[in-house]
Image (cartoon, rainbow, N blue to C red):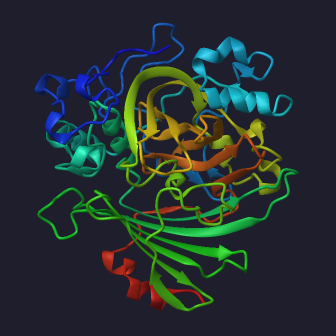
Amino acid sequence: MYTTILVRALGALACGLLAASAQAKVSSEEAAQLGANLTPLGAEQAGNAAGTIPPWQGGLKQQADAYVEGEGYRDPYASDQPLFTIDNTNAAQYREQLSPGQIAMLQRYPKTWRLPVYPTRRSASYPDKVYQAAKANALSAQLLDSGNGLANFSLATPFPVPKSALEVLWNHLVRYRGDSVKRFYAQAVPQQNGSFFVSSIEDLFLFNPAAGDQSQANGNVLFYFRQSVLAPARLAGTELLVHETVNQVQEPRLAWLYAAGQRRVRRTPNVAYDSPGTASDGMRTTDNFDMFSGAPDKYDWQLLGKREQYVPYNSYKFASKKNRYDEMIQAGHVNPDLLRYELHRVWHVRATLKAGQRHQYKTRDFYFDEDSYQLLVIDHYDNRDNLWRVAESYTINYYDQPLLWTAGDAVYDLTNGRYVMGILSNQEPRAQFGVALSPNDFTPAQLRRESRR
């Protein structure tokens, strides 16, 4: 059920798009609720009236031994048993707590797709510096250029008391994922019969501590990113370099591509919006990366409220290093026996394509976790208003850090029965947080020097 908590309509802007001059301000009294009635990142501290969502009690505590070689992250909830399972036979009973896309998946695969529902564990937690930054951001952060840019924030979560759809979206785009990260992952695009091959990919992230500081030369850079395809052989050596800008309308995302066959680095302005994602066989758009990334300017954004929904959460069983890809990846969808769904409060945001703009997706319904602003589910509609694709993110708390992030995400195509499964690390090396990186590691010249031939 939807609630009205923290939902503010700007009457003159019924579509929900917030102009900087009309931005609702957070009062000092509202900011004081962070860490009291609200969590440090702005979620409701209390559970729900039914007791099916518990209060937030700090999430998972940081543990240096959270990760076990050969197994992955210890599942802190391994003893939990499913409360029930939602499938096509009983989906109508839970319709109010599912998205249309989730219901469509149950109908598309009535014999094989199901949602095992477990007790809700509000495990999201972050370092104290993130909480401190969020409290300061509540009174200082600003949207610029009709919501396409951001200023006067630090580190993460610029709007812990969100009053518009774009503020919720920016909380996702600027959520904390560490200071720097090196991760290895696999991606697969199964055929309808379930056959697949694996692409192996390496990502490097360096998040810019000066982001949002307009006095700094690189203040409009949100993070530096480099992606290297390691396998299969026909794609190996392809490298992508990105400087992700904060305001991509004012300064578009800067991107360079190295193609091993050509042995040269070239600017590539098309790494944006609905251009095909890396090694995705056209099953994922570039702005589907990280569930949604990039500029919001093609859409009008509407905040529809907060609701209780069954969403993927605490996917430690799915993320286990004991799982093999041929056991996880099945025809039509991933193996549901490995999944865990919980009832959580989520922000529901709708993006509708602006008149005169072009994109594969006319409408998107986003469902953001209230505790982390991680996108958990997205329903995508085509330009004939047909429900087309459903995306889910299978998250865990990397509680040696701690932070909540994906351990795999999927985009399911309801029309052709295929999907793209990415960010799988079950058979890959462990993600490394806090690696020694500098902006000098993310230049076209450095890409050329280090590229794999």
Does 330 sit above or below residue 430? Answer: above
Residue 259 occupies quadrant: bottom right
Does 55 sit above or below residue 264? Answer: above
| Residue at the spot 17% in from the left edge and 58% down from the top edge | 213
Numbered label tally = 0
* Residue 44: x %, y % from top left: 36, 22
* Residue 355: x %, y % from top left: 41, 42
| Residue at the spot 40% in from the left edge and 84% down from the top edge | 444
Q: Nearer the viewer, residue 201 or 418?
A: 418
In the image, 361: left or right of 441? right
Q: Nearer the viewer, residue 264 or 30?
A: 264
Q: Nearer the viewer, residue 103 or 132?
A: 103
| Residue at the spot 44% in from the left edge and 37% down from the top edge | 351
* Residue 20: x %, y % from top left: 18, 41
Does 244 sit above or below residue 293? Answer: below
Is residue 82 visible from the viewing direction of this image? yes
In the image, 411: left or right of 36? right
In the image, 252: left or right of 314? left
Work out which quarter of the rendered image holds the C terminus and state it: bottom right
Q: Nearer the viewer, residue 428 or 243?
A: 243
Which residue is farthest front?
356
Does 129 sit above or below residue 22? Answer: below
Which residue is farthest top?
49
Is residue 114 visible from the viewing direction of this image? no
* Residue 98: x %, y % from top left: 61, 23
